Image (cartoon, grey):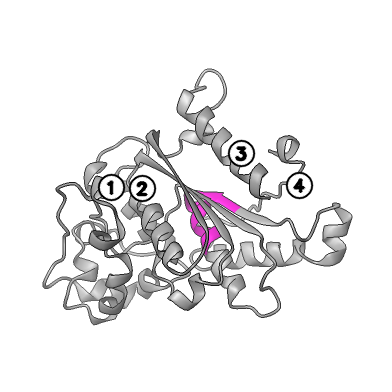
Amino acid sequence: MAEELNAVIVSIEYRLVPKVYFPEQIHDVVRATKYFLKPEVLQKYMVDPGRICISGDSAGGNLAAALGQQFTQDASLKNKLKLQALIYPVLQALDFNTPSYQQNVNTPILPRYVMVKYWVDYFKGNYDFVQAMIINNHTSLDVEEAAALRARLNWTSLLPASFTKNYKPVVQTTGNARIVQELPQLLDARSAPLIADQAVLQLLPKTYILTCEHDVLRDDGIMYAKRLESAGVEVTLDHFEDGFHGCMIFTSWPTNFSVGIRTRNSYIKWLDQNL
């Protein structure tokens, strides 16, 4: 990337669970990015301040999206970012029964059960909640805190028919209100950028989102692209029918998969054309 884009690549070593929990990871990436954007630091590394992009894959895509939203709400940092590029990002923990979660429930690398456990780990929660969250008991109709946010990830309106297919929404009438009471982070836009206010989304920079068909997170990315477009943001949605979660890392022997090389090349090409 550095060579093909003539760019400086900075990888932030944000702290991980169980050393720290949400929202410390976001604080880490915000602090590091603010530091890097200081004029003297940009000058030190000979970086063009008008050519800044934030990017991440999977959990890193979550943090990049959260970082972008944080910057829109800081007057001193507005318009500092030219682009954001999100690779199969994790964007919400309110609905674990989107069509892609249902379709890829047991798909290798990232089955649904593992993804839900990761969320509980991130919030230092109780594994006793996992089974209830899998069937959306944490955002049931009787959980008032979730009511206003549910519409922001209503996949029946945000996804095209080619993705919704014959899948049906899973909305419980009564559930477990204790989950959100003990883990209010579930409904925090810093952990779930997909549920951010429209006013925040419309201030975001031009965006690239890569999604894969064989990935529980496919619909998170597609719904975010739709919400950003509705907010007036220019979005490129790059979907790979043969892609799977994490495929972009499989680009060197003996796991030099075609889809890994194609996703990487497509991502770098977009950056080259827009950065």
Q: Label 3 amino acid?
A: Lys
Residue neighbourhood size for the residue with mark 1, other residues' Cα within 10 Å, grouped as few (<14), some (14–19), many (≥20): many
Q: Which residues are magenta?
A: 55-65
Instruction: Give coordinates of residue 209: x percent, y percent.
Output: 48, 50
Q: Which residue is mark 2?
A: 218
Instruction: Give coordinates of residue 227: x percent, y percent.
Output: 40, 64
Dividing the picture into quadrants, the one containing residue 48 is bottom right
- Residue for point 43% across, 57% down: 225
Give 139 or 265, whichever is nearer the viewer.
265
- Residue 25 forms part of the magenta stretch: no
- Residue for point 12% across, 73% down: 174
Q: Which residue is mark 3?
A: 269
Q: Label 2 amino acid?
A: Arg
Q: Disc 1, disc 2: CB below 8 Å?
A: yes
Regarding residue 134, the answer to whether it shows in the image is yes
- Residue for point 72% across, 40% down: 5
- Residue for point 69% across, 73% down: 77
- Which residue reaches farthest left? 173
Vertical placement of residue 89 versus 74, above or below: above
Q: Label 4 amino acid?
A: Val
Dot 4: element: loop
Q: Which residue is mark 1?
A: 100
**Alpha carbon of mark 3 to alpha carbon of mark 4: how far?**
16 Å
**Alpha carbon of mark 1 to alpha carbon of mark 3: how far?**
27 Å
Residue neighbourhood size for the residue with mark 3, other residues' Cα within 10 Å, grouped as few (<14), some (14–19), many (≥20): some
